[in-house]
Amino acid sequence: MKIGFIGLGNMGGPMASNLAAAGHEVTGFDPIAPYPEGVAQARSGMEAARGRDVVITMLPDGEILRAVAAEIVPAMATGTVFLDCSTVDVDSARAVAAQAEKAGLLPLDAPVSGGIGGAAAGTLTFMVGGTGEAFDMALPLFEVMGQKSVHCGPSGNGQAAKICNNMILGVTMIATCEAFALADKLGLDRQAMFDVVSTSSGSSWSMNAYCPAPGIGPESPADHGYKPGFAAELMLKDLRLSQQAATAVDADTPMGKAARDLYECFVEQEGGKGRDFSAMLPRFETRGRG
Ligand code: NAD
């Protein structure tokens, strides 16, 4: 396929590189990031989008996505796919999809999980909103860039799935970290705590696969001084999106709100920026109730 790829940062760069390595003709645009091998350089987003079968965007936020969409939608041919893989607010995803549909394009919102490692290895998971027709056209590309893609329903539902998943993740990571810190103070050995919880009803991905305690469980960022992994500020971004969406639809999400507030404090006031999101454990270790 002829693919335009706009936003070649930490995630977009390796994703574009994998598409080129799989034999697709990839033309990219990014004002700052380096161009991966095999990706032709366009001089603008519009130039990267013109004449392509599929245009992929991997951008920082909804505002930038809206600006890029305004530039590229008029340049794209009817019946081609506009595949946004960025994590953005549901409203921006739906507004951009409506604009693309009006122009005769097939829009998809397909945020990913799996991080930079998954982008490089081609093992991302895609959560996809849009029509079945658009999903089927993009499926061969999901299969190159990832190992799983789930069609979640109409436009915006990919973003909805992503923020709901990450709201659960933020809440369970905090719960796991505060429980470890309590267990420490109660004199419970961390290995014993892991052995019990990981096989009991308190188990979760945060405990079992990404244990925040160094030296316990499978290897995780805790074993490397909490170098990300999944940075606390990216978790904060997703928790903010979840609360923005909850406000928009009047959903009561007290745990999601508490998680957003805690990560906000951690990132903005307690030096959590640049640390893995599981570094909540050393934060709790040093605190009392007051
Ligand atoms: P990044 O900042 O490394 O990359 C974004 C790129 O977009 C940058 O290179 C920037 O120059 C480029 N850009 C900005 N404005 C542009 C424009 N007008 N035209 C073209 N390019 C433009 O961010 P990233 O880590 O690659 O993340 C991208 C998206 O993926 C974000 O929405 C993020 O939330 C999401 N995401 C990231 C991770 C992760 O672990 N990094 C995991 C899952 C999802």
Image (cartoon, rainbow, N blue to C red):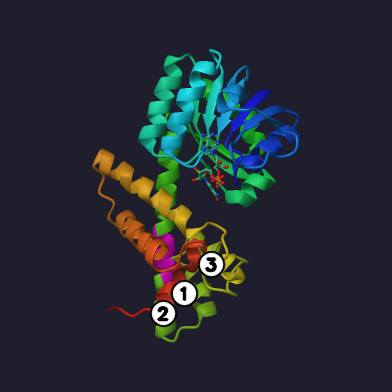
How far apart in space, not on screen, are marks 3 and 2 (Cα)? 18 Å
Residue under circle 3? 211
**Residue drawn 64% across and 41% down?**
13
Query: On the rendered structure, is 76 left or right of 251?
Result: right
Q: Which residues are magenta?
A: 171-177
Where residue 122 sits: x, y (%)? Answer: 67, 43
Tag count in the figure? Answer: 3
**Residue drawn 39% across and 29% down?**
94
Residue 131 seen in this snapshot: no
Residue under circle 2? 286
**Residue drawn 66% across and 36% down?**
16
> Which quarter of the image is occupied by the N terminus?
top right
- Kind of element beneath mark 1: helix
Query: On the rendered structure, is 126 left or right of 238?
Result: right
How far apart in space, not on screen, are marks 1 and 3 (Cα)? 13 Å
Foreground mark, 1 or 3?
A: 1
Foreground mark, 3 or 2?
A: 2
- The type of residue carrying mark 1 is Pro
**Residue drawn 40% across and 65% down?**
266
Q: Is 172 contained in the magenta span?
A: yes
Which mark, residue 282?
Answer: 1
- The type of residue carrying mark 3 is Cys
